[in-house]
Amino acid sequence: MTCHSQPYTAITPSVHGLICYGPPSKLMVYNPSTRRSIALPNVDAHRLRMYHYLGYDPIDGDYKMLCMSRGMHVRRGRGLAHKIQVLTLGNGSSWRMIEDCPPPHSPESPHICIDGVLYYGGYLDTSARLLRKDHVVMSFDVRSEKFDMIKVPTERATRFTRMTRYNGKLALMFTGYGGFGCGYSGYIELWVLEDAARHEWSNKNFVLPRLASRDTLFQVFCAIDGSGEFVLAPDTLRPPTFYVMYYEFMILTTIA
């Protein structure tokens, strides 16, 4: 596959086998298994920060791309989402403005689509000095095209860096290294969404063993839903060998 190399690109995780990659002017959706791709209609970025999220509706079988701009804040913090558009892939569809207006928020990149619901990170307060205090999860129903907001626990869940799927549910993931004494190199902290309407989460922590190789720093990318394993891989490609590791986890603590 030919991928455009640009300093400003959108990268989406795999959604039902498809991925999206590229700058706003050359956004492409790829099917890695068939090596086929389609080019999406251009979005007028106006030099603003753009966010693209790929979602899938399992009922109608539709893929939709959600796009929004993030304006500049008067206090040089994060701007609010605006010009929110959606595109249904296929049949020569074009971008159209979304009818449902979400709560005012500043969008972020970590996102995932689970059972027809697209989740992505956001901030309610856009001032630079309060970014860690108003972290939320925004949800977008791919079929109905309705937004909702899910509050994040005030504990360490505000530090999540990735989203993954855990036992069929959304999970916010944060990884750290050290702090567990001899024999352990780090930990994985998950906050699992139990009830979106009630903003209820459960907390699970897992320990990571020391790895034999000291030349490569492995990053935790996701959990394999239902298998009891995490996927670890280097954050950069280095010759001659690229390793992907699967770690069957051991629960350290579980807090309701």
Image (spheres, helix red, strand yellow):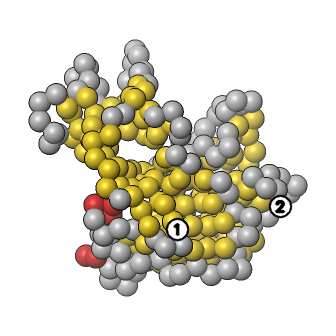
**For the residue marked with disc 2, what is the amino acid?**
Ser
Describe the element under mark 2 as helix, strand or loop: loop
Q: Position of residue 41 (x, y in %)?
A: 74, 58
Is residue 236 visible in the rendered image? The answer is no
The one of 28 and 5 positioned closer to us in this rendering: 28
- Quarter of the image where one finds residue 40: bottom right
Q: How many residues crowd mark 2 within 10 Å: few (<14), some (14–19), many (20+)?
A: few
Is 228 displayed left or right of 143 in the figure? left
Q: How many residues crowd mark 1 within 10 Å: few (<14), some (14–19), many (20+)?
A: some
The answer to whether residue 64 is above or below residue 219 is below
Disc number for residue 93: 2
Which comes sooner in the sequence, label 1 or label 2? 2
Q: Residue at x 82, y 56 (%)?
A: 60
Residue at mark 1: 196
Can you tell which of label 1 and label 2 is closer to the viewer? 1
Single out the residue that lies furthest toward the left. Answer: 181
Single out the residue that lies furthest toward the top. Answer: 240
Q: Position of residue 78 (x, y in %)?
A: 39, 74
- Quarter of the image where one finds residue 34: top right
Disc number for residue 116: none
**For the residue marked with disc 1, what is the amino acid?**
Ala
| Image quarter of the C terminus | bottom left
- Quarter of the image where one finds residue 147: bottom right
Q: Residue at x 61, y 38 (%)?
A: 3
Q: Residue at x 53, y 53 (%)?
A: 169
Tags 1 and 2 in contact by the CB under 8 Å rule? no
Is 5 displayed left or right of 84 in the figure? left
